[in-house]
Image (cartoon, grey):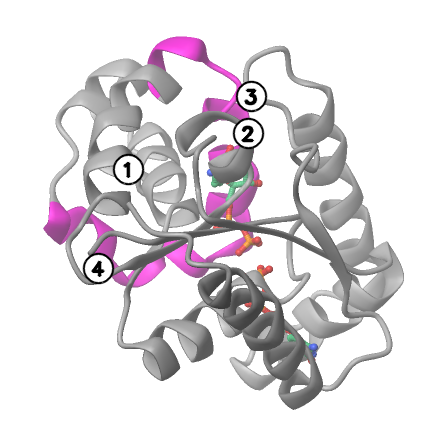
Amino acid sequence: MTFTVAIDGPAAAGKGTISKAVAARLGFAHLDTGLLYRAVGAQVLRGVDPEAAARALTAEDLEAEDLRRAAVAQEASKVAAIPAVRAALVEFQRAFARRVGGAVLDGRDIGTVICPEAEVKLFVTASPEVRARRRHAEQVAQGADDPYEIVLAEVRARDDRDMNRTDAPLKPAEDAVVLDTSDLSIEAAVARALEIIDMRRGQGASG
Ligand code: CDP
Ligand code: CDP
């Protein structure tokens, strides 16, 4: 059985949290595709050519310690606008999506470009202020001290680059269900996502 759940949306909307919970509940594999772009961004900050970095990416690169840094996130959204970088990462993501047993992929273009045939597509979003507050809280918990206003500016800069690039811009697929988590607890957001997935599974979607 293959079954693909595509979860897209802007930074700190709750994609990763929802994806992990849903994958655990359904016994599906999970791929955070943002890590691919972050890993390329981290290499570029070390002086490597972006396309070369994307072509040479290994599973180990996705486990590097520094990928969550704010500077890496910004660099990730810059390299993500380069078509040759995106092209080098497509096949790995598609193969992951076709895994027997089911897969959840989260990112920006999973429902639109990587897996247009996904059985379920969710577009998880929240206001920029709510997302910046969440990211700021995470950074404070990790000992970083950028003020909220800086985190909000970074979120907006990344939204802007991700939504306005020519190749695979961030936008909901036409057949995506939009899930606004601005006023939802994590538990409520996960429950809603599972309801939507169960509905599609009940309709006998399979491949
Ligand atoms: O993957 P993405 O960047 O979309 O977001 P995330 O890493 O899943 O969530 C960002 C932060 O928001 C995490 O600290 C979550 O615990 C938190 N969150 C929340 O407070 N309420 C939600 N409904 C979803 C996530
Ligand atoms: O966790 P967060 O939502 O903050 O970011 P991420 O998912 O780790 O993605 C980092 C950056 O990679 C994004 O701002 C995008 O520019 C890029 N990205 C992309 O272009 N396509 C994807 N499928 C996933 C990430």
Residue 48 visible in the shown view? no
Residue 153 lies, with reference to residue 56, above or below; the image says below
Residue at the spot 47% in from the left edge and 57% down from the top edge: 69
Q: Quadrant of residue 194?
A: bottom right
In percent of width and height, residue 160 lies at 76, 31
Residue 170 lies, with reference to residue 150, above or below; the image says above
Residue at the spot 47% in from the left edge and 38% down from the top edge: 110
Per the image, the residue denoted by label 2 is 112
User: Circles 2 and 4: CB distance less than 8 Å?
Assistant: no
Q: What label sits on residue 61 in the rendered view?
A: none
Mark 2 is surrounded, within 10 Å at the Cα level, by few (under 14), some (14 to 19) or many (20 or more) other residues, namely: many
Label 1 and label 2: CA atoms lie apart by 13 Å
Which tag, 3 or 1, sits closer to the chain's start? 1
| Amino acid on which disc 4 is placed | Glu
**Residue 176 lies in the magenta-colored region:** no
Q: What label sits on residue 168 in the rendered view?
A: 3
In percent of width and height, residue 59 lies at 13, 49
Per the image, the residue denoted by label 1 is 93
Q: Which residues, given as a range, are shown in magenta?
A: 59-85
